[in-house]
Image: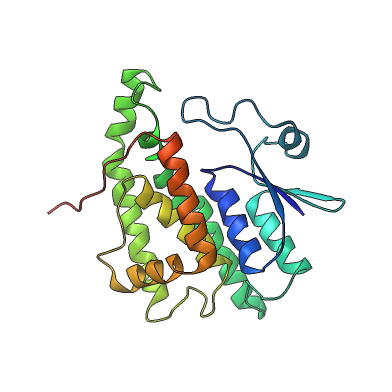
Amino acid sequence: MHLYTAPLSLFARKVEIVLAEKAIPFERTMVAFSQSTGYAPKHPAVLAANLKAQVPVLIDRDLTLYDSTVICEYLEDAYPNPPLYPREPAARARCRLLELEADEVLLVPVCALMHRSEPPDARPPAQRLQLEQQEPAAEAAILTNYDALSARLGDRHFLCDTFSVADIATFMIVHYAIRLGGPSPEHLPNLQSWYARLSERPSFSAIIAEIAAADRELSHPIAPWRQAP
């Protein structure tokens, strides 16, 4: 099995955590990336495999897949133990919805902060100013999402009762919000405990360390977020 990934691709890192949690051996190729030029030049294997020319791309024998959700569902079907989706259909559907909400809803305001890790001169000044003016609304949206996640989590250890892909996907987006100097969930004790608990799992801690190392090499330093009084 071979995975094409990238040092700061949260979706590729999501797949890496799934592979680690399932103890599936794999080789990986880290594609070229910089904060100034992005994914350039595009890796030829990624261009050949993915119509969107994005990582992750997974090759398992004669099967080639892209899109983190498709890859995670395949890994669950092909390598079912340990399970990372609930077995019961309704619970499984709720888990998939939580993954989708992380990947497509919470991701949107987090993306609005991604320019923070770029060099200051990576964009024209007017464009950078426009992005900076959108930051307060993005941070407010992240906090609203945290409130919803906290209510959903309640007093449980995991979002779907047992550890699942929903936890992995949601953690990655929350981690990137914090990494980009956005809000942390520290004002919500249950969500903060959930985040800390996942951070201690070996599969997560290894990826957190690699992302931090990649930021030291590739990213412009980001000031830590401070909660407004």
The number of numbered badges drawn on the structure is: 0
| Protein image colouring | rainbow
Q: Position of residue 52 (x, y in %)?
A: 67, 36
Q: Residue furthest left?
A: 229
Q: Position of residue 38 (x, y in %)?
A: 53, 29
Tell me the quarter of the image containing the C terminus: bottom left
> Which residue is pictured at 35% across the width and 72% down the height?
193
Position of residue 37 in the picture relative to residue 93 (left or right): left
Q: Is residue 36 above or below residue 197?
A: above
Specify whether residue 170 is in view: no
> Which residue is pictured at 66% across the width and 49% down the height?
67
**52 or 163: which is nearer to us?**
163
Position of residue 220 in the picture relative to residue 66 (left or right): left
Q: Position of residue 22 (x, y in %)?
A: 66, 69
**21 or 125: which is nearer to us?**
21
Specify whether residue 94 is in view: yes
Q: Is residue 164 above or below residue 116?
A: below
**103 or 172: which is nearer to us?**
172
Q: Position of residue 49 (x, y in %)?
A: 77, 39
The picture quadrant where one finds residue 173 is: bottom left
> Which residue is pictured at 33% across the width and 68% down the height?
192
**106 or 83: which is nearer to us?**
83
The picture quadrant where one finds residue 31 is: top right
Q: Is residue 10 above or below residue 95?
A: above
Tell me the quarter of the image containing the N terminus: bottom right
The picture quadrant where one finds residue 197 is: bottom left
Position of residue 58 in the picture relative to residue 222 (left or right): right
